[in-house]
Image (tube, grey):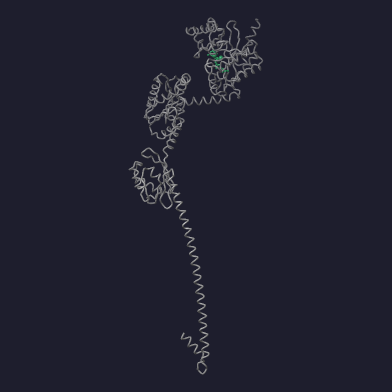
Amino acid sequence: MQRLFDRQLEKSRTPSGEVDLDKLGELVVAAYEQAAHDRRRTDRSISLMVEELDQSNRKLEREIIDRTVDLRAREADLVTQNARFATAVNNMSQALLLMDASARMQMCNHRYIDMYGLTPEIARPGCTLKKLLEARIACGSWAGSPDEYVARALSLAEAGSPTSWFSELPDGRTVSILLHPLPGGGWVTTHEDVTERRGVEMRIAHMARHDGLTGLPNRDYLREQLATAIAALSPGRHLAVLYLDLDQFKSINDTLGHAVGDDLLKAVGERLRETAGDSNVVARLGGDEFVILATGLADRMEAVRLAERLCVAVRQPFDLDGSLLVTETSLGVSFAPDDAREPNDLLKHADMALYRAKAEGRGSYRLFEPEMDARVRARHAMEQALRDALHNGEFEMYYQPLLNLRDGKIKTCEALIRWNHPLWGQVSPSEFIPIAEEIGLIIPIGDWVVRQACAEAGLWPAGIKVAINLSPVQLRNPNLINVIVVAIAASGIQPERVEFEITETALMQNTAVALSALHSLRDLGVSISMDDFGTGYSSLSNLRRFPFDKIKIDRCFVAGLPGEAGSVAIVRAVVGLARSLHMVTTAEGVETAEQIEQVKVLGCTEVQGNLFSKPVPAIEIRRLLSAHITPMAKSA
Ligand code: C2E
Ligand code: MG
Ligand code: MG
């Protein structure tokens, strides 16, 4: 201020150095005005600043109020969410346990506490897993080493991927546990009581691997066990598969009913188990087929002795609700590693041996031999070749005359099929007809025979009949009559010139169907013969069932003539029987002049046999017939 005044004083001095007071006064007033002006400006900016400050304070206050409301709302939301989460967690059907990275509990739900019989005082945040497990041991809901469990859980959590396992509790419950590692350490486990579900699953698994009737392992399970046993076979040790089925089980089932059959199978299963012992597996493959898997045999004789014991055991009568039932079993045995190392091969080989045991007399056992396999292969080869034979034109009909003993004339020729195989030569019908019957090929083959034989008879002199063999399988074929009608019509012969030969087995299987077919045939006007008489089980009752035109006495009885008293008596009795039933008799297989004489004396009507003529090709039978007829015709 002093300096300002000094400067004003200086400025108001005149050149002579005097102070011009007016000028000084002006300068001072001007300075005061300037100062007043400056103060006003400052005052204005201060009030502006205060106003701005006030405004921003108010804005801040508003914002704070807004944010507080928002935070309160969010807090309320969180509280609701937490409540919902707690409700959800506590209402889960599964138990839940959340652990931190140091194996301390962060939380668990009520279900966890209930499931393992814990208390909220123990199972609370901060409790170590080890303490939880010790508490579970104390209340009986766990057994094991807590330290090991904790170490395992920590390593699983560290491994980083979810893992599940079943925990079997000491009280019999099964709990399924799923462990999920959490990011940043720690893990969560869910625990589900699956006792019931596991029980059902185990029952289903048991059913899939066991036979429902006997409770024994089934085929699939046996194969598994067989594979395991073969893999575990130590050097020098053997393993045996004993394949068995009951002899005549089908007839027990048919005559006594399925309920008795089932009871018998159960009792047999039980007895096999007792006899085979706990170290061997007894399985049921289905029907009356059982397999015993005998492991760890030091030598093959052990299995042989077991097979013998099994045969003897099954032979002992079974007491089924007070009634005694007797049965027998045949057994086939194969060995690993000697016979095969594959479960299926071992079973197949044992089955082949069983087949042989049955064929060679029942109630016994056979060990597998490689030639059995060869035989089965040969059989398959024959089946295959048989399927091609018809369209390859490999079949041919031969004919064998039947001679009337009264006038020595040929009245009938029997049509007998021949199979000329390009490699095997001529195959006997006794060999291939049974196979053709089994695989159903007898139907097309039989139809072909009927057409051929009828057509051939159409070329013969009018009085000669043709005899055609019919298999039981053909008799059950509803189309048979059609085929015969068409064949007879096409050949131009009368139905009376056709004879059909059936064996006793045709009447034993499906009797009603067979009888109705025979009556339909008879209605056509053809005649019907009973072939191979005396070889079946119920020859006489078969004669009662159907009025046959002819009985062909089987060649096994003729072979015993003339010397064998038994054969003489049988032939005589059959001839007498046939005569009283108005049936003709043919003696089959006559090979000697003595036999011819004897059957003539015994009263047979006809003979058939190699003595007179073997079966011959069509061309030869025509020649034979014309030579045979011509002299007759001449003499007539
Ligand atoms: P089968 O019907 O009893 O025929 C008689 C069999 O005895 C024929 O055997 C015949 O050759 C043979 N035989 C005839 N006389 C003598 C003899 O003096 N001594 C001996 N040892 N045997 C004699 P084959 O031709 O081998 O036929 C065997 C069986 O095959 C026939 O027995 C018949 O059951 C069946 N068969 C043959 N051809 C056919 C056919 O076309 N259809 C059907 N379903 N079966 C047929
Ligand atoms: Mg015959
Ligand atoms: Mg015969």
Q: Is residue 82 visible?
A: yes
Q: Is residue 171 above or below residue 573?
A: below
Answer left or right for 20 relative to 635. Answer: left
Please give the count of numbered marks on the rendered protein. 0
Q: Quadrant of ligand 2?
A: top right
- Residue at horizontal 40%, vertical 33%? 233
The vertical placement of 51 against 190, above or below, is below
The residue closer to the viewer here, 402 or 611, is 402
The part of the image, by quadrant, that contains residue 164 is top left
Q: Quadrant of residue 170?
A: top left
Image spot of residue 173 (x, y percent) = 39, 38
Q: Residue furthest left?
A: 138
> Where's residue 614, x and y in %?
57, 13
**Quadrant position of the C terminus in the picture:** top right
- Please, which residue is most extreme toward the bottom here? 16
In the depicted structure, whether residue 356 falls above or below residue 461: below
Kindly tell me whether residue 103 is visible in this rendering.
no
Please state the horizontal and vertical placement of residue 123, each as a whole percent of the image: 37, 47
Towards the viewer: 459 or 58: 58
Q: Which of 263/335 is in front? A: 263
Horizontal and vertical percent for residue 581? 55, 7
